[in-house]
Image (cartoon, rainbow, N blue to C red):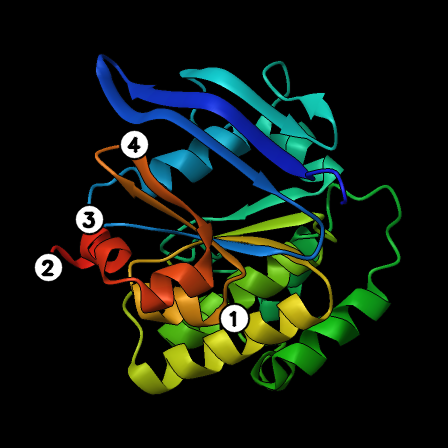
Amino acid sequence: MNEALLKLDKVSAFYGNLKAVDEVDLAIRPGELMCVIGPNGAGKTSLLKAISRTLTTVSGTVTFLGQPTNRASAQQLVSKGLIHVPEGRQVFAMMSVEENLRVGGYARRDQDLGSDLETVFNLFPRLRERRSQMAISLSGGEQQMLAIGRALMGRPKVLMLDEPSMGLAPVIIKEIYKEIRRLKETGITILLVEQNAKLALDVADHALIISAGRTRFAGPAEVVRRDRSAQSLIFGH
């Protein structure tokens, strides 16, 4: 069995005295898609922030590519291929689509970005059509495509997506998830946080259910899809 690309051992995360994540374990191996699901306020977003070092008040051990990350900065992790697409998209509004994408490759040692741009444009044809437009002029769905595309320009070894369906129309959500499935098929390792559990479970290999910061279930996504007791942890019935 392949070694885990990303492993958490009893990871907790704090905002002041508030413990948002409470001793969570996980391991994700090359090519896997793991979803993190649970009710609002469960600690899902805080977990990704703890992994990416955008939240640094963390205990326990995060290991990426076999090395602990407790002394690494968020930028150093990006340069190693641990790339976090936060909720809310956060594109550079007054830069063009292409400029946003090129920014995604800033941490790479090689700067030959042309082939990667083409890959992103093939994945998201709308971005090709709008490559010269300012990001502020894009729809919410197009901005989400841009945020994911920008992350792909960094050639992620693990891609972390936080609530990619948030605030989007159902038809756009369907399109976004079609592309997430395509990314998985190319072998990209993905850690996906999603409020819409059904969407996440349909595409995931493994699921982590958390509530009040604690792990309530960890195992194959298929188990959650057919196990009512596991579903009750998410939906409360």
| Residue type marked 3 | Asn
Image depth: mark 3 or mark 1 in front: 3
User: Mark on residue 145?
Assistant: 1
Q: Position of residue 160 (x, y in %)?
A: 53, 49
Q: Residue at x 33, y 70 (%)?
A: 198
Which amino acid type is shown beneath numbered disc 4?
Answer: Arg
Image location of residue 207, percent across then percent down:
44, 53
Figure quadrant of residue 125:
bottom right
In the rendered image, which residue does mark 2 sit on? 237
Q: Nearer the viewer, mark 1 or mark 4?
A: 4
Mark 1 vs mark 2, CA separation in Å = 34 Å
User: How busy is the neighbourhood of tag 1: few (under 14 within 10 Å), some, or many (20 plus)?
Assistant: many
Q: Position of residue 230 (x, y in %)?
A: 28, 54
Q: Nearer the viewer, mark 3 or mark 4?
A: 4
Mark 4 against mark 2, which lies toward the viewer?
2
Q: What residue is disc 3 on?
A: 40
Quadrant (top left/top right/bottom left/bottom right) for the C terminus: bottom left
Judging from the image, what secondary structure is the residue with disc 2 in? loop
Where residue 95 appears, x then y in whole percent? 55, 61
- Seen at 49% across and 69% down, the residue is 203
Q: Quadrant of the N terminus?
A: top right
| Label 2: few (<14), some (14–19) or many (≥20) C-alpha neighbours in 10 Å | few
Count of numbered labels shown in the rendering = 4
What is the distance, in whole Å, between disc 1 and disc 4 at their CAs?
Answer: 31 Å
